[in-house]
Amino acid sequence: MKISIQPSELKGEVTAAASKSSMQRALAAALLRKGRTTIFNPGNSNDDNAALDTIQKLGARVSHVNGGLVIESNGVQPVSDTINCGESGLGIRMFTPIAAMSGKRLTVTGTGSLTTRPMDFFDEIFPQLDIQIQSADGKLPLVIQGPLKPHDIEVDGSLSSQFLTGLLMSYAATGAENVTIRVRDLKSKPYIDLTLKVLEDFGWKVEEENYEAFHFRAVATDQWPDREYRVEGDWSGAAFLLVAGAIAGNIVVEGLDTFSTQADRMVLQAIMASGALLSVSPDQISIGKAPLKAFHFNANECPDLFPPLVALASFCEGKSVIEGVNRLTHKESNRALTLQEEFGKLGISIQLQDDLMIIEGKSSVKAASVHSHHDHRIAMACAVAALRADGPVTIGNADAINKSYPDFYEHLKKLGAVVGNVE
């Protein structure tokens, strides 16, 4: 799919999409928690749908009622020999330990770029938990057989916090007590805050000690009451809308929790540093154009902000610096190189120096044909930058957005962007 975006002025209001980080964790918790859970404001991205399929393969029963989801579960009881997590990095890393709670031999796989991402974390950790595992030299598919038995372990948190999320959820759901997970060099701590918040919302007790140790307290789960959970608005997707407002118009974004534990809420700091017009209230965020200046931002805890912040920096006077390039290698694409290549086509110079990305801003970008590299956030970043191009920008493989934010182009059009399909 190709789309063309014309230079556009934005105006109006839009409601943020549901957070796939919140949605996927809620689905996992609903599977692990025996009983009935109703989820409101469910997401509809490819990653959300893959997680929904996974919990059903692992024994949950799902029905759609009045726009929400009703999930009935008696714990992890697989009804299939294979689970496919699609292209979701969180899905594969979170659900693999959860699936290993069963004693059934299971194959865990995925699609697209997920097949090339490193999974040797499991090769190292699973034998310590009495789980048998076979991998393809540290990559998918994985063949596992539990049941998982919690023990004191130490894990490396430098690659991704998503591996730890899966262990925290599976340990809590086994009723583990008097065991500790110790973590070295944990990255993306706010995502672990989100995991702990979801576990607490569903009734589990996990004590965190400086993000270096996690202790578990057993809770009775046999007679839990029915539970309701509302999925938060997504700061990761909304970051693109907020940047679009900062460079192309005056808009209002609703449906975001300004007290959220989502890491990408930090986008507000970068936007404020850039000098954009910004007004934040509990129920909405107003943002508008102003002369933009270069900013310095540390994205080590929120690497998904690189694409929208590159779009923002492209229109800031001077050289903006974003730290955390080493967090970009194992994404849907190598985002540092992809951003450099695609924004280079738009006339934006991006330098990579060790762990720094340096973006030299301009008043506008060039009309060009770019490609998403099958990466949803690259497609959205290019689309936002196109709003201030000197002519139309064509984006190849534009439907990559379906992974996380399938309504993105429709939301841009609602705000006044001129978006069209290219044959």
Image: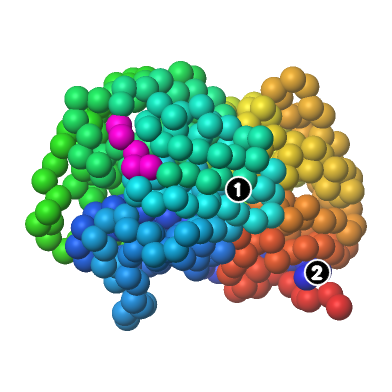
| Residue of label 2 | 2
Crowd around label 2: few <14 · some 14–19 · many ≥20 (10 Å): some
Q: Nearer the viewer, residue 370 or 289?
A: 370
The residue at the point 23 percent across, 51 percent down is 202
The number of callouts visible is: 2
292 magenta-colored: no
**Relative to residue 417, is residue 275 drawn left or right?**
left
Q: Residues in magenta?
A: 146-150
Seen from the viewer's position, the closer of residues 5 and 1 is 1
Q: Residue at x 65, y 56 (%)?
A: 111
Whether residue 186 is visible to the viewer of this picture, yes or no, is: no
Q: Which residue is mark 1?
A: 141
When the figure is inspected, residue 315 is found, relative to residue 406, above or below; the finding is: above
Which residue is located at x 56 percent, y 39 percent?
A: 134
Q: Quadrant of the C terminus?
A: bottom right
- Please name the amino acid that badge 1 sits on: Pro
What secondary structure predominates along the stretch shown in magenta?
A: loop
Along the line of sight, which residue is nearer the eye, 76 or 341? 76
Residue at 53% x, 32% y: name it.
123
Question: Residue 181 appears at what percent x and percent y?
Answer: 34, 25
